[in-house]
Image (cartoon, grey):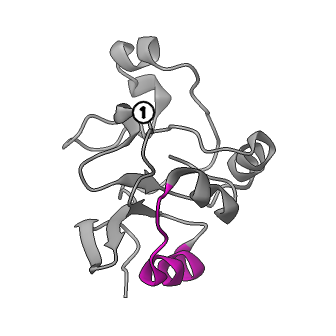
Amino acid sequence: LLIGDISQISLIASKLPPKAVSIINRYWPGGVTIILPAKKGLPKYIVSEQGVGLRMPNHKPLLNMLKVLGEPIAATSINISGEKPITDLSHLPAKFALSVDYVWETQKKFRNVPSTVVAVSENGIKIIRQGHVKIK
């Protein structure tokens, strides 16, 4: 889920461990997705066994939209799991175009390296996917 403000975390996560606060303060907004324990009752399609993934993007127009909305939105990159990310909409497979409500096209050039995904719990942190941001 993409969020526009740190206060939106409480809408989704059941806990905010201290290690998560440290990561948020250091790396957000930016290319780090944090998986936190999910609140009960969230739709199954946004929750995994590990929790719910949240990211505050470092893209001002998108951040502004998220702040105006006042709640997280479900969003994804345009790629098939395990394959290289699609960075050019002309390469967008038809199945994606038919299954999404909106594609935000921008002139900003993005890295071909995905975001870093880290699961945070009371027991510590676990790197799920190493992206362009190195968690220290």
100 up-or-down from 25: above or below: above
Q: Is residue 19 magenta?
A: yes
Residue 6 x, y percent position in the rendering: 65, 64
Q: Residue at x 39, y 51 (%)?
A: 52
Q: Residue at x 28, y 68 (%)?
A: 130
Q: Residue at x 44, y 39 (%)?
A: 41
Q: Is residue 125 magenta?
A: no
Residue behind mark 1: 43
Q: Is residue 111 left or right of residue 59?
A: left
Residue 1 x, y percent position in the rendering: 50, 46
The three-letter code of the residue at mark 1 reads Pro
Q: Is residue 88 left or right of residue 51?
A: right
Q: Is residue 48 left or right of residue 59?
A: left
Residue 51 x, y percent position in the rendering: 34, 54
Quadrant containing the C terminus in the rendered view: bottom left
Residue 125 x, y percent position in the rendering: 30, 77
23 up-or-down from 72: above or below: below
In the rendered structure, which segment of residues is drawn in magenta? 13-27
